[in-house]
Image (cartoon, helix red, strand yellow):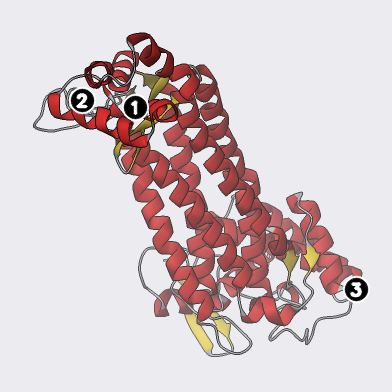
């Protein structure tokens, strides 16, 4: 009967590892010691570490530290992992060591064992590739893990989140243009205000998102600087000259993004202010989306007893007890995502401030929270655009009724009769439930023609 486990060895001795697993002893110890929660290290972060291992192998070969056979085996193993052939071999939880060492070793061990399979060597033999001496050569978790966070965050934002935001703003711009002449009543303090067009109202949403996107992209500038080569504490011990430059050149080629060697490894390893800044910009984006979703909920409220100036798509029944009810569920889903992201940002702020001396020991949390926030927002924005914004329609009848009933149109009379008389007209109209024109004529402040000339909503906007 075939055994369902094998023995692997690390510096602490032997440990049983599942027979078919490509990970080794240190990964298995982490599985045993950190069975906390369900959150795994994100695959985006795993893949970025794989890109680093590939780049390191190329650099180490160029610098004469490993031979061509080892370099090629590491590259082949990395290619298989990046193709998604071994996703199940990275089972470690976020809640592990604060440096991410167990995940770094998980990757080193998997690459080592893939190389073993390719050369008909035994799993766990560390032959022909050793996880520490070959895969991890010239590196430390303390420099590779933050480097991987930088790479994965920049890639996720530039290649996924930014295009999704652009799609939404293009959609909002199209709606804004379509509705540029549809005049409605504005509202401040949740009360009637002066008119604007529905197109102008929507343009505010689009600009708010564009500004949030631009700020987010600008915040990435310093993430393009990587601390790779700092090794344990930033000094670069056991890292040869030119390793950083050679590795980062390969990373840039693989990612189609231009990265640079950091100006000060110590800073980027001891603290993650730059990542915290990016997370704060993600929170601002979430705040903008939260506000927009709430605006749409208010404007679509009804259909009989609310504002109901816009009509949202009817995607699914809204109640298990009230027949015919339809709810703004896409707004609610987006708002929940935004709320979660805001909580993640707070955790990142605390984590960033809590590092000690030469290393921040909250790296897995920081990486997980930022990457999860990006993924949640990317998915939520796509759903919001497709399932809600695309199908929004104005309700001209209600828009016209609300506009004509608003007492705040009286603001247009102020230049002719002054604030006090205009306020008197508004109060009379409200108290006697008559329209502004009748109140104006009753008080004798303007003629019918003068009133009509002043109350021109096209000119008000």
Q: Which element is circle 2 on?
A: helix
SS of the residue under disc 3: loop
Mark 3 or 1, nearer chain start: 3
| Residue designated by label 1 | 410
Is residue 372 in view from this perspective? yes
Choose between 410 and 174: the one closer to the eye. 410
Q: Nearer the viewer, residue 56 or 74?
A: 56
Residue closest to the eye, 57 or 397: 397
Residue 323, x across and y down, in percent:
11, 24
Q: Crowding at label 2, few (<14), some or many (≥20) Cα neighbours within 10 Å?
A: some
Q: Is residue 28 left or right of residue 336?
A: right
> Which residue is painted at 27% across and 20% down in the image?
440
| Quadrant assignment, res 184 | top left
Residue 338: image x %, image y %? 40, 51
Label drawn at residue 63:
3
Q: Which residue is mark 2?
A: 429
Residue sitting at x 60%, y 72%: 273
Disc 1 is placed on an element classified as helix
């Amino acid at each position: 009967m075939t055994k369902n486990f094998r023995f692997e060895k690390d510096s602490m001795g032997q440990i049983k590892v599942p027979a078919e697993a490509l990970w080794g002893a240190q990964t298995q110890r982490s599985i045993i010691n950190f069975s906390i929660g369900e959150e795994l290290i994100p695959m985006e972060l795993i893949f970025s570490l794989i890109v680093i291992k590939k780049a390191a192998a190329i650099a180490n070969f160029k610098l004469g530290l490993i031979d061509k056979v080892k370099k090629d085996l590491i590259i082949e193993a990395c290619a298989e992992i990046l193709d998604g052939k071994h996703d199940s071999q990275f089972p470690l939880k976020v809640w592990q060591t604060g440096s991410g060492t167990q995940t770094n070793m998980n990757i080193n061990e998997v690459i080592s064992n893939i190389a073993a399979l390719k050369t008909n060597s035994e799993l766990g033999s560390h032959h022909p590739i050793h996880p520490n001496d070959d895969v991890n050569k010239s590196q430390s978790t303390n420099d590779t893990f933050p480097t991987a966070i930088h790479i994965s965050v920049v890639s996720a934002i530039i290649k996924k989140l930014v295009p999704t935001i652009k799609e939404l703003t293009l959609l909002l711009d199209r709606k804004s243009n379509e509705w540029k002449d549809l005049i409605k009543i504005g509202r401040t303090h949740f009360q009637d205000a002066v008119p604007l067009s529905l197109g102008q109202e929507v343009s505010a949403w689009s600009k708010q998102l564009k500004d949030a996107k631009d700020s987010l992209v600008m915040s990435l500038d310093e993430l393009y600087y990587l601390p790779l080569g700092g090794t344990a504490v930033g000094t670069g011990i056991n890292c040869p000259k030119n390793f950083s430059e050679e590795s980062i050149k390969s990373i840039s080629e693989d990612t189609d993004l231009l990265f640079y060697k950091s100006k000060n490894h110590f800073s980027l390893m001891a603290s993650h202010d730059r990542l915290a800044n990016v997370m704060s910009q993600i929170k601002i984006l979430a705040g903008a989306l939260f506000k927009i979703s709430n605006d749409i909920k208010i404007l679509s409220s009804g259909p009989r007893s609310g504002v109901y100036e816009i009509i949202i798509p009817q995607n699914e029944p809204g109640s298990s007890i009230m027949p015919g009810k339809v709810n703004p569920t896409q707004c609610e889903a987006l708002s929940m995502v935004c709320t979660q992201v805001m909580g993640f940002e707070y955790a990142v702020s605390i984590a960033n401030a809590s590092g000690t001396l030469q290393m921040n020991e909250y790296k897995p949390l920081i990486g997980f929270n930022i990457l999860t926030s990006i993924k949640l927002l990317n998915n939520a924005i796509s759903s919001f655009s497709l399932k809600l914004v695309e199908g929004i329609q104005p309700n001209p009848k209600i828009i016209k009724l609300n506009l004509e009933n608003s007492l705040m149109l009286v603001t247009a009379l102020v230049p002719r009769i002054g604030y006090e008389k205009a306020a008197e007209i508004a109060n009379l109209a409200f108290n006697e439930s008559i329209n502004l024109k009748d109140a104006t004529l009753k008080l004798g402040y303007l003629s019918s023609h003068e009133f009509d000339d002043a109350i021109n909503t096209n000119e008000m906007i």
